[in-house]
Image: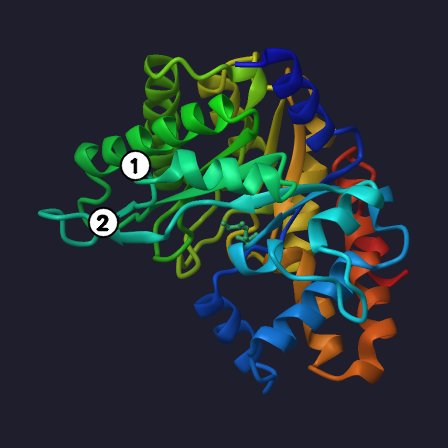
Amino acid sequence: MNKELLETTAQAMVAKGKGILAMDESTGTCVKRFVKYGIECTFETRRVYRSLLLTTPNLADYIAGAILYDETIRQQVTGSNVPMPAYMAANGIIPGIKVDMGAKPLAGHPGQVVTEGLDGLRERLAEYRELGARFAKWRAVINIGEGLPTQAGIEANAHALARYAALVQEAGLVPIVEPEVLMDGNHTIERCYEVTAVTLQSVFAALFQQGVYLEGIVLKPSMVISGKECPQRAAPEQVAAETVRCLRDHVPAAVPGIAFLSGGQSSAEATWHLSLMNQLGGVPWALSFSYGRALQQEALETWHGSDANIPAAQAAFRQRASLVAAAATGQYTPEMENS
Ligand code: 13P
């Protein structure tokens, strides 16, 4: 394991005032996002859209790295023969790759899922490294429900995450370790805290057991937040305070950075929560972002599948990226939404 390389990459991924763009939607998810705006989802429209994002002028001022999907890492930027990862590297954005194969029902545990993709991963990582990837992502999904999650569900996911992380580090890439506690449901913020706490505890125990080098990972957690259908949703200040408290209790200081997912929060909410956390301060890790929807929503809506809208979509995307980057140093306030 090249520890120095892993540390350098991990620190660059969460460099001060920057974060990660998650644009690694599987084709199925991409269809769902495009359909909302009546955009046909094809190999070519996905290429146009992802090129639009990556060629946004001065994106590297705000975005340190971007996570690609298997199809995208093999595509060339629209109107050129430059592969996406080569374009990114030349423009100061570290290429990353989603390597999990999705969450599948966990046998014998109704309502719970486990992420698959370990078989053959060593070989796939060697190819991705060749294609230019410098970090990887694996998303584990934890559902909150009546009597859920169970310890069995949490541990199956933690074990897979740790085995993935060890393989990724062996290949010289930085693993993004993503245990997502879903916002779906009517649970309270207190219940989300409990589940996030046991999940993180289990994940770090598994990482330790598998010998994962903590200085060479980036943690991508969900925030401690009320369920979407909770009748009494916690205020932004409480989300920030409880998230920081939970992380401080469960994430070792050796981890260089925490890059949150947005998980279905609106762009403005996800930006405000991150800024409030950075205003609290007093934590040993960088508090940054690895948003998908919260970064892309406005760009996708503005683009609407039309070439004529590309400059406006890029402007909307750059504006959101600049706001989230400001939040990563606690400089964002909601008033900036209208500026
Ligand atoms: P969201 O920010 O839309 O949750 O996506 C982040 C991500 O990469 C989920 O795996």
Does 338 sit above or below residue 161? below
| Coordinates of residue 104 in the picture (x, y in percent) | 26, 53
Furthest toward the left, the residue is 108
Residue 155 in view in this figure? yes
Residue in the image at 60% along x and 39% along y? 130
Residue in the image at 20% along x and 54% along y? 111
- Tell me the SS state at disc 2: loop
Residue in the image at 34% along x and 40% along y? 120
Left or right of residue 331: residue 140: left
Does 98 sit above or below residue 316? above
Does 14 sit above or below residue 231? above
The image quarter containing residue 317 is bottom right
- In the picture of the structure, the residue carrying the numbered disc 2 is 112
The image quadrant where one finds the C terminus is bottom right
Residue sitting nearer the eye, 14 or 9: 9
Which of labels 1 and 2 is toward the front?
A: 1
Residue in the image at 84% along x and 59% along y? 56
- In the picture of the structure, the residue carrying the numbered disc 1 is 157
| Coordinates of residue 89 in the picture (x, y in percent) | 77, 42
| Label 1 or label 2, whichever comes before in sequence order | 2
Left or right of residue 59: residue 287: left
Amino acid type, mark 2? Gln
Amino acid type, mark 1? Asn
